[in-house]
Structures are given as C-alpha cells and as structure tokens.
Image (cartoon, helix red, strand yellow):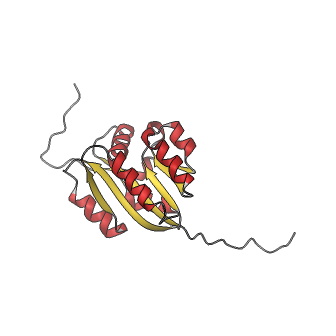
Amino acid sequence: MSDNPTPEVLINQSVAILIDGNNIERSIHEEAKDPNTMINFDTLIPRLLDNRGLNRLVYFREGKHISGKLKERLHANYHGSVRPCHKSADIPLTIKATQLSSKVDTIIIMSGDSDFIELVSHLKGEGVRVEIAAVKRTTHHLLIEEADHYHEIMPGDWFTLSPKKGVKKSRPK
C-alpha cells in the first residue's frame, strides 16, 4: 500500500432536471402546512448537481397561471424553462425525459409520483442514471427503490413567503 493520497476524480456528467411542479408544490405545502411555501432553487439545484453540469432544467406545471417571477428566475439562473401542461405533468415530463435520454448522462426527476416508476425503469434500461428528488413522506417507496439515487427535499430546501400586506389570512374554523 502506498502513502500517496487517493487522486481526485473529476465527475464529468451532463444532468437534466425535470420538475413535476404540481407534485412538488403540493408535497411542500403539506409538509410545511403553509400554501405560501416555495422551493429554494438556489440551495436545492447546486445540492442536486453536486458539481455536475446542468444540461437542461424544465419545470412542468398544470394550468395557465404560472408565476412570471418563477419563469424569469429559472431562466436567468439556470437557463431553465417553465412548461404549462393541459392536465398533469406526467405525459409531458415523460416525453421530455425520453427525448433527453440520449443527450444526458443523468436525469433527475423532482416528483414523488408513483406514475414515474415505469419511466425510471425505461430510462435506466436506456443507460441513463436516474435520480429522484422529492419530499420523503409523499414519495412512493417503489419510486425510491427503482431510482439509482434518492435526494430528500427537506425544510432547508424551501422558504415561506410573507403574506402580502392588506391581504387577510383566513383563520381555520
């Protein structure tokens, strides 16, 4: 055995992050017990990437009313995009993941939805590393088991907005 330290390994992976916005928002609101709670992408994205290169970030969200600030922030900081979905994000996210599977080394799916189990299995069969990032309590255990790696989204990964002045908070009855 030599006294030489282990050489540093450079990880050169291209990563796509695909976000099921409705699923993640709902999970965080349930955990925080506050609908004004939002993901702190500035802390979460670097933690998920862990010094790997970001190829693409797409935030899928059901509905037409999507925060302009969210769109601007994701584009400015991560060259990301927000894609409105007619219904759930499941099909558009799945299509995008399949399109990207030959262009990236790793796909991180931010969702705990069990509907993605088959997608994870398919992507792995295509040779793509698949990671799941979600709130543990609202993530299906089979999705965690199928993925190559699981990142737990925890309270340090979100923040709560203060209610706007002049807007009364409704009290529970």
Q: Is residue 152 visible?
A: no
Q: Nearer the viewer, residue 46 or 17?
A: 17
Residue 119 shown left or right of residue 127 in the figure: left
Extreme residue in the left direction? 166
Q: Identify the image quadrant of the C terminus.
A: top left
Q: What is the x, y in percent for residue 5?
A: 76, 72
The answer to whether residue 128 is above or below residue 1 is: above
Q: What is the x, y in percent for residue 91?
A: 35, 47
The residue depicted at 24 percent of the width and 60 percent of the height is 69
Extreme residue in the right direction? 1
The answer to whether residue 15 is above or below residue 150 is: below
The residue depicted at 29 percent of the width and 64 percent of the height is 73
Q: Nearer the viewer, residue 173 or 1?
A: 1
Q: Is residue 21 visible?
A: yes
The residue depicted at 42 percent of the width and 46 percent of the height is 111
The answer to whether residue 142 is above or below residue 21 is: above
Q: Quadrant of residue 126?
A: bottom right
Q: Quadrant of residue 28?
A: top left
Q: Nearer the viewer, residue 100 or 8?
A: 100
